[in-house]
Image (spheres, grey):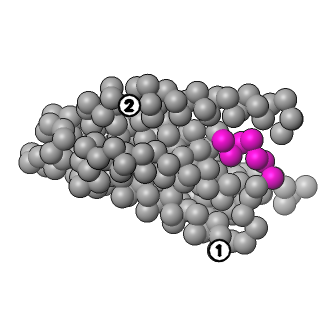
């Protein structure tokens, strides 16, 4: 990456983090849809954006890439659990841990995906889509309050949004997989 672009990336990441984790944090934690479908993805995206400033960072060993992707999936699962969501809303220290965790796994996921095989990328993205789909269905289906910090209607709305995100991620994964296969076959024919 051009040395002139790096400061711009760092500035963009810093601005995004300041906005999402400090300035608008109180607004995000007022409702479950804002928290789960806007704030968490924005934090994750800031980690991905930060990784763009370091294009040479890529995990050399497949085992490290796999470990980073497992850590990413585990973190996403953890922050979807009702107990984790509630605790992060009421505990400022856990809320900050959520911020650090999401930015870190965004960075690690980006670095791991950079050198991951097509199969590893597809499996990871498909697994995340399936996880979001399951969480979305669960939140839409249950008529009991799962998160004490939010309402049932917010829970159902979050489930609806998660279903949409899961569907979009699944479609994106399939398109990426088909395009990659096409490039491979075109390359073999040359």
The dot on residue 130 is: none
* Residue 29 sits in quarter: top left
Residue furthest to the front: 93
Q: Distance between the residues labelled 2 and 1?
A: 36 Å
Nearer the camera: disc 2 or disc 1? 2
Q: In which quarter of the image is the C terminus?
A: bottom right
Q: In which quarter of the image is the N terminus?
A: top right
Labels 2 and 1: the sequence-earlier one = 2
Q: Specify whether residue 172 is painted magenta.
A: no
Is residue 39 in view?
yes
Q: Give the range drawn in magenta.
A: 50-56
Classify mark 1: residues with Cα within 10 Å, few (<14), some (14-19) or many (20+): few
- Residue ID for mark 2: 25
Residue furthest to the right: 190
Q: Which of these two is toward me, 134 or 1?
A: 1
Find numbered disc 1 in the image and state the secondary structure of the residue it sits on. helix
Q: In this view, does 156 lie to the left or right of 8?
A: left
* Residue 122 sits in quarter: bottom right
- Residue ID for mark 1: 63
Find numbered disc 2 in the image and state the secondary structure of the residue it sits on. helix
The residue drawn where x is 86% and y is 35% is 3
Q: In this view, does 160 lie to the left or right of 53?
A: left
């Amino acid at each position: 990456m051009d040395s002139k672009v790096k400061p711009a990336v760092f500035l963009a990441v810093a601005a995004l983090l300041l906005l999402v984790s400090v300035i608008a944090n109180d607004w995000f934690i007022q409702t479950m849809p804002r928290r789960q479908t806007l704030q968490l993805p924005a934090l994750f995206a800031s980690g991905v954006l930060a990784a763009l400033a370091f294009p040479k960072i890529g995990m050399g060993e497949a085992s490290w890439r796999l470990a980073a992707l497992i850590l990413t999936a585990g973190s996403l699962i953890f922050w979807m659990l009702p107990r984790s969501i509630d605790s992060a809303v009421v505990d400022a220290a856990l809320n900050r841990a959520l911020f650090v965790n999401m930015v870190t796994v965004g960075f690690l996921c980006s670095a791991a995906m950079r050198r991951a095989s097509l199969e590893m990328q597809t499996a990871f993205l498909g697994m995340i889509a399936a996880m979001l789909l399951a969480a979305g269905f669960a939140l839409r289906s249950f008529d009991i309050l799962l998160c004490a910090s939010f309402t049932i209607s917010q829970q159902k709305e979050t489930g609806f949004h998660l279903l949409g995100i899961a569907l979009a991620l699944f479609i994106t994964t399939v398109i990426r997989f088909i395009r990659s296969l096409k490039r491979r076959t075109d390359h073999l024919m040359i």
